[in-house]
Image (spheres, rainbow, N blue to C red):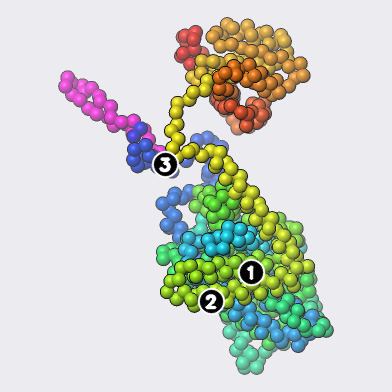
Amino acid sequence: MIGGRRPLQGRKIGDRRVRVDRPHSPYFRYTGAGMLTAKEAATAPRTGVALVWSNLRRSLFGRPLSNEDEAEERLPKKLALPIFSSDAISSSAYATEEILRVLVVAGAAALMLSIEVAIAIAILLTVVSISYRQVCRAYPSGGGAYVVARENLSQTAGLVAAGALLIDYVMTVAVSTASAIQQIQSIIPAAYDYRIEIAFASIALITIGNLRGLRESGNIFAFPTYLFVALAIGVVVIGLSRIVTGTVPVLSPQPEVVRPGVEVLTIFLLLKAFAGGSVALTGVEAIANGVPAFKPPEAKNAANTMVTMAFLLGAIFIGVTVVAHAFAILPSEDNSGGPTVIALVAQSAYGHGSPLFYIFQGATALILFLAANTSFNAFPRLAAILAQDGFMPSQFAFRGDRLAFSWGIALLATIAFCLLFAFNGDTHALIPLYSVGVFVCFTLSQTGMVRHWLAVRGPGWWWRASVNAFGGLLTLVVLLVVASVKFRDGAWLVLVLIPMLVLLFQFIHRQYATSRRELALRPDQVVAPPHREERVVVPINGLSRAVVQAINVGRAISPDVRAVLVVDDHAYAEQVRDEWARQVPGVSLVVVESPYRALTGPFLAYLDVLDQAWSPDKDAPITFVVIPEYVPRHWWERILYNQSTSQLRRALLGRPNTVITNVPYRGEEPAVFERRGRLDSHTPPDGSGG
C-alpha cells in the first residue's frame, strides 16, 4: 500500500496516536500486494483543453464505462434481434427488385418465375440458418466463419473467411445506405440530388450511436426495426387477402418503369436472377459472430434469435415477391429516381396517399439505414478477434470509453462512405460486389462444421454433419453461380480483394511474430544487473533552466555527462562557453560549429565519433541522449517551440545502443521563477541541490 501507518506524538507525555495515510484512495483501489485498480478519477482530465474535450465526448457518447459494466451491456433477445438482424431483414426491401430487374428482360413469361426463384432462395436461407444455429452452439465465443474455418480447416482458410466477411460488412453499409436513399426518393424525388450528403449524415449518426455502446445503440435502433417488420407483414397480409378475394388493384402507369424485353429465357438468366436475389442472405452470419454480446445463456439465446430472424426474413421476402407478381409490379429504370418495388407494393396494399404508406416508407428507409448497424457491431468484433490473433493492428482490439471497439467502428464508417462516394450512391452498381463474400463465408463455415462434427462425434453428430455437408455443397454451387454471372459486373473486384487482404493479414502477423521473437526472454534467463557503461549527452541551444534540469537528470543517470552545442555563430558559441564555465562547473561542454547550418547531422556525427573512439576491448556503452524540452503554458504556444527537438528525436529513433530521454520543463509565472531563483542561489556548486 502506498503511504502506511505513521506514529504521532500526543499533546501529553505518553499519548500515542497512529495516522494511516492512504494517498492512493481517491484514484486507486488496493487489491493486493503490489496491485492497484484505477478508479474513474484516475482518468479525469488534468488540463483545461482536456476537460473541454472530455465534456464534448461525454455529450456525444456518454460517460465512460468500466469493465464491470460490461455485463449490463449484454443484450436480451428483444434488443439483439434488431441489432444483429436488421441487415438480413432489411434485405427483403430490395431482394425482390433484384430478381425482377433480371427477369424483366425476358418478358412477362419470365416474370412468372420470380416466385419460384424466391422459394429457392428461401430454401437456401433455411439450410444456412440451421447451419449457423449449430455454429452458435458449437462456438459460443463468437467469430463465426473465421473461427470455424481456422479451427477445423486451416489458418489460411480462416483468413479467407475473415477477408470475405470484412468486405461483406463494408458492402452492407454501402448497399443498405444507398437503398435507404432510394426509398426516400420514392416519396421525395428531389432527395436524389442530395444522396451523398444524406449518406454521409446517416453513416455519421450510426457511427456515433455505436460509439455510445452496444446496449444504447440497441435501444435507439429497436423501434424502427420492429415497426418495419409489423408494417411489412401488414403489406403481405393485405396483398395476399386481395389476391384471394380477387380485388387486385390496378396501378397507375409509371413513366420510369423498365419495359419487358424479348430476350430468350435461359438457364443463365434464371441463375442470374437467383444470384441477384441471393442478397437476401446477407447478414445471416452476423448473429454467429456476435454470440458473446448476448445475455446468458449466450449460445441458446443467439440460436433462438437466429431462428426468429430466418422466419421473419423468409416470410416477408416470399410474401413481397408473391404480391409484386400478382400486382404486375415492375422495377424502375436505373438512376431514374422512380419508386422502388417495395414502395409500389406498399402503395398497392395501403393505398396511394395513405398515412400507413408514408409511415411504411419511412420505416423502410430507417431499417435500411440501420441495417448498417449490423455491420457496425460485427465488423469491429471480427477485427478485434483478428487483432488478438495478430493479423490486424493491435489497436483494433482496444475498447473505448463505452466498451465499443472504436477503431473498427471508425474504419468501417470511413471505408463505407468512400465506397458510396466512388459509386455515386448507386445501389445497382454496388450489388454485384455484395454477395460473393457472403457465400465464401457460408461455404467455408459449413465445410469447417462438417470437420468439427466428425472430430467431436457427440450425440446426433451424424445428422448435424449431414446438414452442414448439404449446406456447404449448396452454398458452394451458389458461390460459383454468383461469381460467374456477376464477374464482369464487378464481382471480380471482390475475388481480387480477398487474396490481397489475406496477404496483408499474413504480413502483419509476420511482423508481430518477428517483434515477439526479438523481445522474448528465455524461460531460464535471470536478469542480471547492467554491466555496460553508460554516458549522457545533452544537446543544448544555450544556457537555460530547461537545460540545467536536463543536466541534473543526466547526472542522476551517469557521472559521465557532457553537453553538446551545435551552432553556426562563433561569437555566440564563445558567449555560451564563458557562461557555462561560470554557472555549470563540473560538466564539460562540447561546441560543434556547423558552417552548413545543419543541426541534426553534426550531432549524429558527433555520436558516431564517440562510438568509434570507444575502446574495442570493452562492450559498447549505452548512450543516453537527454533532450531538454520547454513546455509552454498554453496549447497554442506549442507551435513556437521544440521543432528542432522533434526533428532530432525522430532522427535518433532506432539508433543502436541509444536511449532517448525527454525532460520537459513547464513554463511558469515570473513570480515562480523568482522564488526558485532565490532557492537556486543556495545550491551547492556540484549541483546536488537540483
- Mark 1, residue position: 439
Q: Residue at x 46, y 50 (%)?
A: 65
Residue 94 quadrant: bottom right
Q: Residue at x 47, y 74 (%)?
A: 461
Identity, as a three-letter code, of the amino acid under mark 2: Val
- Mark 3, residue position: 38
Residue nearest the observer in this picture, 140 or 415: 140
Judge depth for marks 1 and 2 and give the one in front: 2
Sequence order check, earlier mark of 1 and 2: 1
Q: Confirm whether residue 429 shows in the render.
A: no
* Residue 25 on the magenta segment: yes
Residue nearest the observer in this picture, 149 or 345: 149
Judge depth for marks 3 and 1 and give the one in front: 1
Judging from the image, what secondary structure is the residue with disc 2 in?
helix
- Mark 2, residue position: 467
Image position of 680 with respect to 380: above or below: above
Q: CA distance from mark 2 to mark 3?
A: 50 Å
Q: Residue at x 70, y 74 (%)?
A: 481
Identity, as a three-letter code, of the amino acid under mark 1: Phe
Q: Which residues are magenta?
A: 3-28
